[in-house]
Amino acid sequence: MDITTENVLLIGSLLLLISILAGKTSYKFGVPTLILFLSVGILAGSEGIGKIEFDDPQLAQFIGIVSLNFILFSGGLDTNWRSIKPILWHGISLSTLGVLFTAVSLGTFVWAITDFTIYEGLLLGAIVSSTDAAAVFSILRSKNMALKANIRPTLELESGSNDPMAYFLTIAFLGLVVNQDQSLLSIIPLFLQQILIGAALGFLFGKLSKIIINKITLDFEGLYPVLAVALMFLVFSATDRLGGNGFLAVYLAGVYLGNQDLIHKRTIMRFFDGVAWLMQIVLFLTLGLLVYPSDIVPIVGLGILISVFLIFIARPIGVMLSLAPFKMKMRRRWYISWVGLRGAVPIVFATYPLLAGIEKAHMIFNIVFFVSLTSVLVQGTTLSKVAHWLHVALPKKAKKISPVDAFLADGTKSLIREITIPSENFSVGKRIVDLHFPRNAIIAMISRNGKFLTPNGATQIEEDDTLIVLMENQRNIEAVYNSLHLNYDPETEDENNL
């Protein structure tokens, strides 16, 4: 079946519906959701029952880039600074040195066992060198795993931040394959340019985006996520145009915004969480349509060798060497090594050699597809078992609620407090978003001139306003008073428990 204007919506909606229904039941059988999405795409493709003809790597790459923007930006918004601060350098080391060591060791292995040149081997190693944010986020969160110490934030920080390094290595080694007269040292200036410009513009655009979101008054709450989408693509495209790493900039801008006070922040975060899932489904469906299963069969033997080396040797080498300067129990290092899932990102990066027209482009694409499929299927289905085997798992009842989950939760609050704002108070004339209210407290209503208002982040506080504040526990009360620059006296202040 050909994709035409007349049937694209029907086909797309049916594929999405089938993917969601399949994903709903997948974990009952221990199959990762992303594998189901990919399988639906393959079955709908030209060699499946759907017979949909799709052989456009350029369109697949475009869909991949758009999807990765949403996935990385959403992952950045969900990254809580307090959670990652203790393991920041662990994550940075894993996402840079870990990716480099994995790419070099795997690339050397491929060069040794095949007729690939060293640069072609390194290109293949670079493409599959990063863990996939979509795969790691979705599997860890779907399995609701409780892990000891700071293993989970380390894994999520690594998977969210190592795609830029893998992208750089892919582009750099692809350039060396196309122009083999260049020296390996020639990629160093490109690396510095990509990382430094990407990091600087990521934080710069993040700060600028906060100002724009909080200063522009929009008539409809639903327009704020749309504004955030526009800013996200502006960050990526402007950084890329200026020679920086756009993926790194998008992720860092998301991290910055996720840790700031924004108008309608919950609305924005929930929107991106839902769209990120949509992008994951669309991405895996598209890549499933793009692959020809008959082309995979001839490379199965080689694919198994590369997958085994990647999972049991290359990934552990990258993890152990990059974490060598840090104190960490060996079993935790081994678990981080095991959660080295490859997913859609390597397959997207594998479209770059196809579009460059290099000799072994199709073989690289098929190997990468097989390796990614194997990684998610083998490692993704055993995360819980390996966690218990290595004694890094916690009982579910011991799992702490993450700051992001607590922020987004709609659960009932246990305390209510009425706070009247005196004249000449610090908060008079300020918007709620500028008060830096504690995350576990909300202003539910404002009593003003005998009327009750339902406030939002842009609502300005006036003198003699009475704020009806809901809080989770006693510890939030003093923080609320501090944000309003009021003195908290527990002996004289009235307190009502819900």
Image: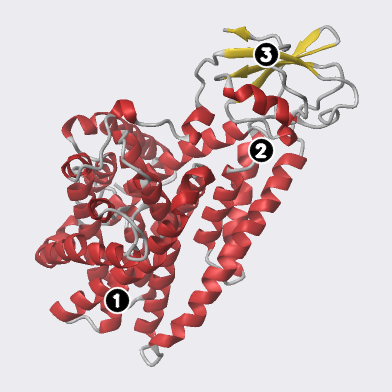
Q: Amino acid at mark 1?
A: Leu
Which residue is located at x 49 percent, y 29 percent?
406
SS class, disc 3: strand
User: Quick check: 67 left or right of 377?
Assistant: right
Q: Are marks 1 and 2 in contact (CB under 8 Å)?
A: no
Q: Position of residue 289 (x, y in %)?
A: 29, 51
Task: Say above or below: 247 vs 450.
Answer: below
Q: Nearer the viewer, mark 1 or mark 2?
A: 2
Q: Which mark is residue 417?
A: 3
The earlier-in-sequence mark between 3 and 1 is 1
Q: Which mark is residue 374?
A: none
Q: Amino acid at mark 2?
A: Leu
User: Which residue, given by chain and number where applicable, does mark 1 sit on?
Assistant: 122
Q: Amino acid at mark 3?
A: Arg
Q: Position of residue 360 (x, y in %)?
A: 25, 76
From the image, which quarter does the C terminus lie in?
top right
Which residue is located at x 57 percent, y 72 percent?
243
In this rendering, does residue 155 appear at all?
yes
Which residue lies most toward the left here? 301
Image label count: 3
Q: Nearer the viewer, mark 3 or mark 1?
A: 3
Task: Say above or below: 352 vs 212.
Answer: below
User: Which residue, given by chain and number where applicable, does mark 2 sit on?
Assistant: 262
Q: Nearer the viewer, mark 3 or mark 2?
A: 3
SS class, disc 1: helix
User: How many C-alpha atoms fall within 10 Å of the one at disc 2: few (<14), some, or many (≥20)?
Assistant: many
Which residue is located at x 73 percent, y 46 percent?
212
Q: Looking at the picture, tell me which residue is in the foreground, 148 or 41.
A: 148
Q: Position of residue 209 (x, y in %)?
A: 67, 49
Measured Cα–Cα span from mark 3 to mark 1: 61 Å
